[in-house]
Every structure is written in C-alpha cells, then in structure tokens.
Image (tube, rainbow, N blue to C red):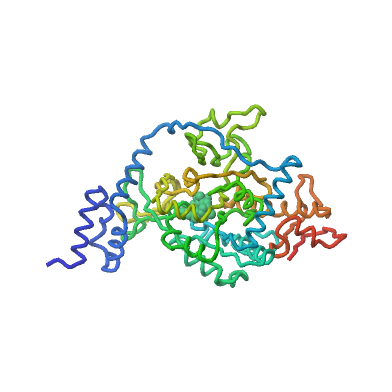
Amino acid sequence: MMTSMEQRYRRILDVMISLGQEQVLRFWPDLTDAEKMSLLDQLESLSAEQLQRQSDLIKQYRAETAPRPLQLEPFPVIPLAASAAERTRDQQAAKVGRELLRQGKVAVLVVAGGLGSRLGREEPKGCVEIGPISRRSLFQFHTEKIIRLEHLYGKPILFLIMTSEQNHTDTIQYFHRHHYFGKNPDTLFFFSQSSQPAFDQYGKLLLRSRHALALSPDGHGGLLAALQRHRLVDRLQNAGVELLYYFQVDNALCRIADPLFLGHHVLQQAEMASKSVAKRNAEEKVGVFCRVNGRPAVVEYSELNETLRNQRDDQGDLRFKQGSIAIHIFNLAFFTRLFETKVQLPYHIALKKVPCIDGQGRPITPERENGYKLEQFIFDALPYARNTIVVETSREEEFSPVKNASGLDSPETATRALVELFGRWLEKAGVAVPRGPDGLSRHRLEISPLYALDEEELRSKIPCKLEIIGDTFFD
Ligand code: UTP
C-alpha cells in the first residue's frame, strides 16, 4: 500500500511530467522524508497553469529577435520650476502637500525585497552604510527622515517595508538590533512579497538544491499581490490614510513624502503619480515615461529602439527624455480598484546569475547570467490609473541609487552624492564650502535627517559665521 507521501509524490510527478518539468523530482530517491515533504510543498504551491505560461514565455522570449513595435509618444511632465509663475505653482502645491501630512493622510512604503545580486552582499541592501561620516545605513537614513517628518507635522507616519522571503528575517532583525532607529515599532509594518521560480534557457525549472527550487522575489510589482495578501490597504484606510508614498530602498537621496509632489498629485486629481529626471544621455539605461498606444507607461531602455532613443525635439532635447526614478504616489482607492478588477501585472523576463545545481546535483555558482527570472514591475500599474501625472525633479537632489559594488551607482557614489547635496545646502545657507579643483567638496559633510530635512530647514538652524575647516557633521 502506498503511503500518503508516495501518493502525493505520484500525483505531483504526473503534473510535472505533463508540464515537461519532471527533472525537479530527479533526486527523489536520495532525499530524506523531511526534504521530500519540503519539495512537495514547494511544487504544490505552484499553479500548473501559471508554470506553463511562464515556461512558454521564456521560450518565446528567446525566440524573439526584435522588440515589438509600439506606438510611442513622450508623456508630458510637470517640469522643474524655471519661471516665477512655476515657482508660485510649486509653492501652492507644497502647501497642499504639507496639509495632507498634517492631517495624517500619507503613509510611506519602501520596496526592499530585491536580492541586490549586482551589489553581491549577504545582508539586505538597506543595511549598506552610506553616511559620509556617521556610516548611517540606507535604512537608517530613510527611517530618520520619516521621524523628522513626524516631528514637523505632528502626526505619526506609518512606514511599510516590503521584504522578500529571502531577506525578511534579516531585515527585521537589523531594525530590531538598532532599536528601529528611534521610530515607534507600532508604526512599522514589515511584510514579505512572494517568490517565483527561475528557469533555464529551455524553460525548465532550476533547482537550488536537491530538494528546493531556485526561487527569487517576484519583482517590485509583487507589491500589489503582497498588499492584498496582507490586507494592508484596509489597515491603512482604517488609520485614516489615503495616499501611499512609494520609493526604493537603494535610492540614497530619496526625498520622502515630499509635500510638493503630494500637492501636485492631489491638485491634478491623479490616482498614481511618478517622479522623473532628465536622462543623462540617450544611452542611459533607464525606463522613460511614454504614452503607449495612448496610455501612460514606462518603456524600458531595451524596448526603445535606437532611432527613438536618439530622437530630438525642436529645442534639440532628447524627445524621450524623462527617466523613471521609481518614486510614486498611489491613492489607496486605486489599489482597491485594481484588486476588485483582478488586474494582473505582466511578467518581465530578466536574465540573471542564479545559483543552482546541475543534473548531477553539483552546486553551480554562475560567473555569467544563466537563469531566467520573472518579475512584475510596479510601473505597469500606470496604464490602469484613471489619471496620472509625472513630476520632474533634479537628479542631484533626489536620485543616487546603490546598484553595484563599485564604480557607477555604488555605495561610494551614493556617499559622494550625499556630501555634494549637503555642500549645496550649506552654500545656499551662506556657508563657504571649500572645494577642490574638480569642484567637489574637500571635506566630508553630513547632515542628519534629524537635524534638517532640506535646505530651508538647515538655513533656519545654521549657526552664523560657520566655517567649514574639516569633516563636518550636523547631528
Ligand atoms: P533592482 O531591480 O535594482 O533589484 O531593484 P535589486 O534586487 O535591488 O538588485 P539586482 O538587480 O539583483 O542587482 C530596485 C528596487 O526594487 C526592490 C529592490 O529592493 C530595490 O529597492 N525590489 C526589487 C523588490 O522590492 N522586490 C523585487 O523582487 C525586486
């Protein structure tokens, strides 16, 4: 007589054979009972239909030679203020935004579930230390900015941290070890997104070990399903929140709950809003804001052909110039509508290094990209928004991501970007900042978010006749 585990095994094996994925059970006879159970649990949690779709998607992706033709137009943005009228426009928007914060209508969300494979560290990316003097981590900077906002506006601000199955425990332990950086833990929500299996080039599931699939987080667009699964929208609405301010953990300069952006969002009656920066050049690999067949969207670098990438407008500017920096505002009611209408964001395929085992069960630590991951992107919610706006901001003020271990977009460039940001704030407050021949600050400068959140706040606090004669930290 077959045991219930054997029955389960037979049933799942049949499904895997029908999907052409029976290799995942190749090591079955060598597994312990606990390992068998764990593998069956993983396989049972996959939807056969979805697995087939994903595997087909990869085979199809590999067969495709040219990107699909799209009807593209640039998406109009609210530009950086250049005239007196635009400055007045911004002041009015910022006033509205401040009022929203005073009313406690804004919660903040950081997506921190990524594996940071390019950075290549064990710890979650938010733990990377970038404080020019204090060695504050990304998580600490973000959390302290929110604490400062709570003081300024007199209301607690709920802070949601999306992790993944791979880094959830480490993230919580990190915050716990640092006493939540002084933020009331009752106002923090850690929740995990889901995972998706990785595939090889033939659309076959990869194994991480003899009894486990190679899984990775399902992309920042996994936020939608995670919010729904954890019932977070209801919880926020019950707390009187109407808007969710979204950013990515690796942006060292992110202005959080920016009143100007919030104000524009509300004044323009948007359901989803985004910030953009001008691309450095045609070849910068960022997604750009477009209208695709009339609908707003972010079009990835790889989907914009060379002609469009280089196209210029009448002023000689890049026509598709506004790059996405992954800062958004969402109306909670927009999420509710997406849930009710069962919107499924599309999967994007990324070729990445996926540690796995080979057919003999030997571990492979890939030196080159070997596996296909499927990820959802949150900006794919844009076409569903009834109204959406894009607000331009300055890269130097708001965007310095940590992606790589060294060189471009690394902890080093993020730290430098902070020093330069603080240097400019000090100069605007009338303080001379000694600069080298390259124009960069000679000294390390740091302003704690708890001391000042922006240049206006700094100006109101700075002692008169301040001289910078060495590394300087305002705490
Ligand atoms: P990236 O796309 O840069 O991915 O994420 P990453 O994991 O940080 O780094 P690589 O590509 O593996 O080197 C941009 C932001 O989206 C979050 C990341 O944590 C980061 O804040 N993210 C990404 C998630 O929250 N979940 C994901 O599944 C992917």
Quarter placement of the C terminus: bottom right
Of 228 and 356, nearer the camera is 228
What residue is rendered at 76% in x and 51% in y?
424
- Left-right relation of 300 to 322: left
Q: Residue furthest right?
A: 465
Quarter placement of the N terminus: bottom left
x, y (%) of residue 229? Answer: 41, 61
313 shown above or below 423:
above
52 shown above or below 110:
above
Question: Can see residue 285?
Answer: yes
x, y (%) of residue 327? Answer: 58, 50
- Left-right relation of 373 to 241: left
What residue is rendered at 58% in x and 44% in y?
389
What residue is rendered at 72% in x and 50% in y?
91
- Left-right relation of 439 to 367: right
Q: Quadrant of residue 185?
A: bottom right
Q: How many marks?
A: 0
What residue is rendered at 65% in x and 31% in y?
317
x, y (%) of residue 362? Answer: 34, 56
Question: Can see residue 117?
Answer: no
8 shown above or below 349:
below
Of 36 and 19, nearer the camera is 19
- Left-right relation of 393 to 21: right
